[in-house]
Image (cartoon, rainbow, N blue to C red):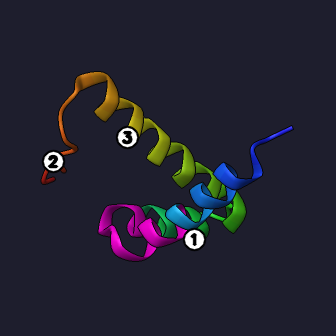
Amino acid sequence: MANKSLKKHLHLGALAAMTYDPELKAYYIRKVEEGKSKMLVINNIRNKLIHRVCAVIKRQQPYIKIAA
C-alpha cells in the first residue's frame, strides 16, 4: 500500500545522505557497530530526513546545520 516511487526516492536520499553528511555517516557506522542491521539503520536515516523536511516546511526557514 506504500507509494513505491516515494519510498524509492527516500531510500536513495538516505543512501546519499549517509555518504555525504558526516553526522548521518557517523550515526550509521555507530549503529552498525552496535549490532543493528544495516537496513534498520537506513530506515532510521529515512525517518531523520523526513523529520528534517517537515521541520523546514513547518518553520518556513531553510535547514541550518548546527555545529556540535
| 2 and 1 marks in contact (CB < 8 Å) | no
First in sequence, mark 3 or 2: give its number: 3
Neighbor class of circle 3 (other Cα within 10 Å; few <14, some 14-19, many 20+) is: few
Whether residue 34 sits left or right of residue 48 in the image: it is right
Residue farthest bottom in this picture = 19
User: Magenta residues, as a range?
Assistant: 14-26
Q: Nearer the viewer, mark 2 or mark 1?
A: 2
| Quarter location, residue 32 | bottom right
Q: What is the three-letter code of the residue carrying label 3? A: Arg
Which x, y percent locates residue 54? 40, 32
Q: Nearer the viewer, mark 3 or mark 2?
A: 3
Neighbor class of circle 1 (other Cα within 10 Å; few <14, some 14-19, many 20+) is: few
Whether residue 39 sits left or right of residue 23 in the image: it is right
Q: Which residue is mark 2?
A: 66
Q: Is residue 18 magenta?
A: yes
The kind of secondary structure element at disc 3 is helix
Q: What is the three-letter code of the residue carrying label 1? A: Glu
Which mark is on residue 33? 1
Q: Which residue is mark 3?
A: 52
The kind of secondary structure element at disc 1 is helix
Which residue is depicted at the point 43% across and 76% down? 19
First in sequence, mark 1 or 3: give its number: 1
